[in-house]
Image (cartoon, rainbow, N blue to C red):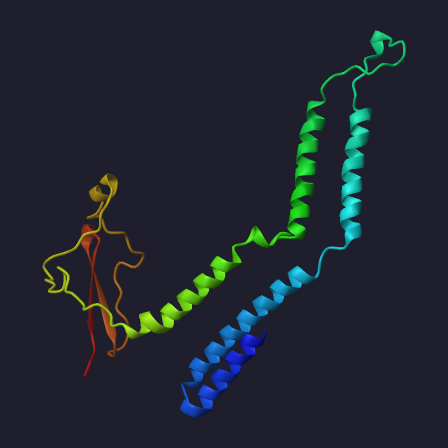
Amino acid sequence: MIPLHWVQQIVMDELSDNAPPQALVNHFMQELKAYRAAFRKLFSYDWVCVPLVYTQVAALATYAHFGFCLIGRQYLDPSKKYRDHEVDLIIPIFTIVQFLFFVGWFKVGQDLMRPFGMDDDDFELDYIFERNVGVSFAIVDRLQMNDYEPLQKDKFWVSDDSIMISMPRTGLANQNKHRKPMRHIPSYKPIGNRDAEEVYYHGEDNLIIFDCYIDQ
């Protein structure tokens, strides 16, 4: 958090010396506040762990349940009249599927307890730091100091009102491109002589012409 305090001190010194726009300073401080809040939230996730008793109870309940299922869900056919009550070895397919789902969810929950991993090599921190520093210096030095490329005129720079640029259409849309949508109000003339607008409706062609005029 110390570098963030340094950034605040630099901004305050810049505000007292060069007096930048207050809106720009306010926006920068709001973004810095959000950045610090994200760091604080991340630190809380890494610091406060799930109590160990919760994980122990979940592990004991999961494995005990399937331990009892392994014995209790064996299929014994009474009509065979087992002499010593030997277990008839039938594969419990649904129990196996349930075991895969439950134990899989349990393992995912254990991994979510430590989202950043227990090893330093889980994240390439060196690459992340080097890239952030490189991008920051590029934004400040190269991107801000270099001039932008000269603007070039495209083929529509000198436009002609008689040339209409049509959007690409599908085959069905191309057949219906001349059909205008029917309006709810066929004709309308507002009351008043300022910023008035007249709308005319022409028969079956559904053509609507807007004639705007302003009295001087």
Residue found at x 32% / y 73%: 144
Q: Which corner quadrant of the image does residue 40 belong to?
A: bottom right
Q: Residue furthest right?
A: 84
Q: Is residue 82 above or below residue 166?
A: above
Residue found at x 43% / y 91%: 17
Q: Is residue 76 above or below residue 136?
A: above
Q: Which corner quadrant of the image does residue 212 belong to?
A: bottom left
Closest to the observer, 117 or 19:
117
How far from the left and from the top, in percent, is residue 14?
A: 44, 87
Horizontal side of 96 relative to 60 (left or right) equals: left
How far from the left and from the top, in percent, is residue 216?
A: 18, 83
Q: Number of labelled discs?
A: 0
Horizontal side of 184 relative to 103 (left or right) equals: left
How far from the left and from the top, in percent, is residue 134?
A: 41, 65
Q: Where's the N terminus, which quadrant?
A: bottom right
Q: Is residue 148 above or below residue 172?
A: below
Closest to the observer, 148 or 160:
148
Horizontal side of 161 relative to 112 (left or right) equals: left
Residue found at x 66% / y 38%: 104
Q: Residue furthest bottom?
A: 17
How far from the left and from the top, in percent, is residue 121?
A: 57, 52
